Image (cartoon, helix red, strand yellow):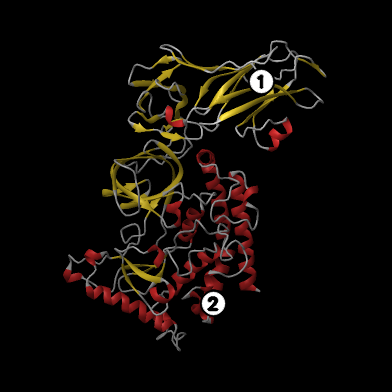
């Protein structure tokens, strides 16, 4: 058969859209190649060209077991099979008939490029040989485009890698769906070869609808998929939040509405809030990650699940923590130890503006309130009872996380100029913080620090014990040192509080997503070695043998009374509860076995931890080694 090239035909028909290019290939081997008996009239057709690819069709050789490979190259080189493999240009490789029986779709190519196409064939024990060749030019991506798709009024999420719009349904809570679409100017939409006339098109749950957008002037076409995701239940409650506009930062509140839907498999049965909220971003380094955290507030105090009523709540993403539970287990351990307050966290599946965004924890923020830090507030409206002695909530933070609205002060060892840290007064807020109260708490903390670093700091009457509640310092230190929490060195996210008439307490414990072997810097990947003990105030406390003995006694009490048994059982129980939700989360965020800052690899490399169970095993193994090291150090 002589070589020939059939020029690409682009046509838009009123009922069926087909962009067609038929190329009968040259270099056709019509003779016997070893075991191959190739048909005399073999021809390669390149048709149905799309912005992302095209469809191939050819006459396959007779017999079974032949293997084909398709290479698509736009560098102008004529490639043998081995070169095509080496250059990464093989786009399909399969046994004849196993996909479409002679018709094969090539996708994910670069628009605007002319491709040389090669089809190779080989039999058992034989080298691959070129069978057919042709050419195809991929239209530019902007020639045919869907700008947006809204399903039941909610924006569907566009994935550019496969040209899909997906609306993640809240796990089947809606029975009927329909979508509206917006096209670029000059384009029309086709479904099943028929031009779409209706502006609103029905869509079934779990359906994947293939559509084609065609530019009527240029003839360029582009395939899209519109789909409904979800349709299941992971055993967790579902939080659905829809906002009036996108959430862009951590300062500006965005109005929205939240609905909590109970799980049919593991119902909590209480605290199913539905109503208005205001929401904004939250987190330090975590705000820069793809899966983001949020703070939100309700107009009135409400109960969410079994947590105490409040207006202030948070949604924690735990993106880099692939166990999804470092924060949760640390807070629950703090509760086991009897600390005055540890934030309660409850696991949920989260839908934001129609998009499933993963497994989250919804929980309490640090606040003086009933059911949280349950101490009397300083309230400027009760002037007769304006007690300067408390209650205050303080946070040690760093200048790179400076909030211009914060009310701050410094001490000699925690300063902006020398150490790039400061003390922030989180409560009372500006409305209830008089100038006298500001001076009181600033002077109290400075006096406590002076006593801690003074010559007679061990004196129980005039030293640090007159100002610091040592029991809270011991428990706070124990938990943070156990996790080797990289953020717990009086650097950032370090909370202290002073109840009315009381001493300065450490706590609540906070922010453990980079703890327990999940940070590859500052030596925090290694389960051995002291870390938190080197921080500003803690190092000085351990210069007092009495404090060191308190810590040793407390550690041994916890070890000998089954606290660690409960701790590890909770990890296993939580992992079992999260099994389905974690699977969905890591489908959304395929990061298992992938380094996400600042994942550590000390016990086992990140790239070997390719399942959720691997991450749980890693967490338990790291904590086991950590407990063994601490126990040997303090009891040797």
* SS assignment at label 2: helix
Point out which mark residue 252 bears: none
Say left or right for 601 vs 532.
right
Residue 531 seen in this snapshot: yes
Vertical comparison of 589 with 363: above or below = above
Q: Nearer the viewer, mark 1 or mark 2?
A: 1
Residue 81: x and y, percent?
72, 30
Q: Which residue sits at x=19%, y=67%? A: 380
Say left or right for 589 vs 153.
right
Say left or right for 194 vs 50.
left
Residue 203: x and y, percent?
40, 22
Residue 167: x and y, percent?
41, 32
For the view shown, which residue lies furthest in the bottom direction? 455
- Labels 1 and 2: the sequence-earlier one: 1
Q: Which residue sits at x=44%, y=52%? A: 288
Point out which mark residue 98 bears: 1
Vertical comparison of 244 with 41: above or below = below
Residue that carries the numbered disc 2 in the rendered image: 548
Say left or right for 237 vs 110.
left
């Amino acid at each position: 058969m002589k070589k020939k090239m059939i020029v690409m035909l682009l046509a838009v028909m009123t009922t069926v859209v087909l962009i067609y290019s038929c190329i009968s290939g040259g270099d056709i081997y019509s003779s016997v190649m070893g075991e191959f008996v190739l048909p005399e009239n073999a021809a390669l057709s390149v048709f149905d060209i799309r912005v992302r690819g095209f469809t191939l069709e050819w006459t396959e050789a007779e017999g079974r077991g032949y293997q084909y490979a398709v290479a698509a190259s736009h560098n102008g080189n004529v490639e043998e099979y081995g070169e095509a493999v080496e250059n990464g240009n093989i786009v399909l490789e399969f046994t004849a008939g196993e996909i479409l029986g002679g018709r094969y779709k090539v996708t994910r190519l670069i628009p605007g490029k002319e491709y040389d196409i090669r089809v190779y064939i080989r039999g058992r024990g034989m080298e691959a040989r070129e069978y057919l060749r042709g050419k195809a030019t991929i239209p530019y991506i902007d020639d045919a485009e869907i700008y947006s798709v809204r399903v039941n009024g909610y924006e569907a999420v566009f994935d550019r890698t496969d040209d899909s719009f997906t609306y993640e349904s809240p796990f089947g809570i809606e029975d009927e769906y329909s979508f509206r679409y917006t096209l670029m100017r000059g384009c029309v939409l086709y479904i099943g070869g028929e031009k779409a006339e209706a502006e609103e098109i029905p869509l079934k749950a779990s359906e994947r609808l293939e559509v084609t957008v065609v530019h009527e002037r240029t003839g360029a076409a582009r395939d899209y998929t519109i789909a409904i995701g979800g349709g299941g239940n992971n055993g967790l409650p579902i939080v659905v939040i829809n906002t009036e506009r996108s959430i862009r930062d951590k300062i500006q509140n965005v109005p929205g509405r939240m609905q909590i839907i109970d799980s049919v498999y593991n119902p909590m049965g209480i605290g199913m809030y539905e109503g208005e909220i205001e929401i904004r971003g939250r987190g330090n380094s975590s705000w820069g990650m793809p899966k983001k955290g949020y703070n939100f507030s309700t107009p009135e105090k409400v109960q969410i699940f079994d947590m105490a009523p409040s207006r202030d709540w948070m949604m924690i993403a735990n993106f880099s923590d692939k166990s999804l539970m470092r924060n949760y287990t640390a807070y629950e351990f703090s509760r086991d130890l009897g600390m005055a307050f540890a934030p309660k966290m409850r696991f949920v599946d989260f839908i934001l503006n129609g998009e499933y965004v993963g497994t989250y924890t919804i929980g309490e923020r640090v606040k003086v309130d009933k059911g949280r830090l349950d101490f009397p507030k300083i309230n400027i409206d009760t002037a007769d009872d304006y007690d300067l002695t408390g209650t205050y909530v303080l946070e040690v933070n760093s200048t790179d996380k400076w909030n211009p609205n914060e009310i701050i002060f410094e001490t000699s060892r925690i300063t902006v100029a020398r150490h790039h840290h400061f003390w922030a007064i989180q409560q009372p807020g500006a409305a209830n913080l008089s100038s006298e109260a500001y001076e009181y708490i600033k002077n109290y903390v400075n006096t406590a620090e002076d006593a801690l670093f003074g010559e007679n700091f061990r004196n129980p009457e005039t030293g640090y014990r007159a100002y610091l509640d040592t029991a809270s310092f011991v428990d706070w230190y124990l938990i943070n040192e156990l996790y080797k929490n990289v953020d717990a060195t009086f650097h950032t996210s370090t909370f202290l509080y002073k109840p009315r008439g009381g001493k300065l307490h450490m706590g609540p414990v906070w922010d453990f997503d980079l703890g327990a072997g999940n940070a590859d810097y500052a030596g925090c990947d290694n389960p051995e070695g002291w870390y938190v003990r080197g921080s500003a105030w803690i190092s000085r406390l351990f210069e007092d043998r009495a404090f060191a003995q308190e810590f040793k006694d407390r550690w041994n009490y916890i070890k000998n009374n089954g606290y660690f048994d409960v701790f590890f059982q909770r990890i296993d129980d939580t992992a079992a509860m999260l099994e389905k939700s974690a699977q969905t989360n890591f489908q959304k965020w395929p990061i298992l076995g992938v380094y996400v800052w600042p994942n550590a690899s000390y016990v086992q490399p990140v790239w070997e931890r390719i399942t959720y169970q691997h991450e749980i095993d890693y967490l338990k193994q790291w904590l086991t080694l950590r407990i063994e090291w601490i126990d040997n150090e303090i009891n040797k």
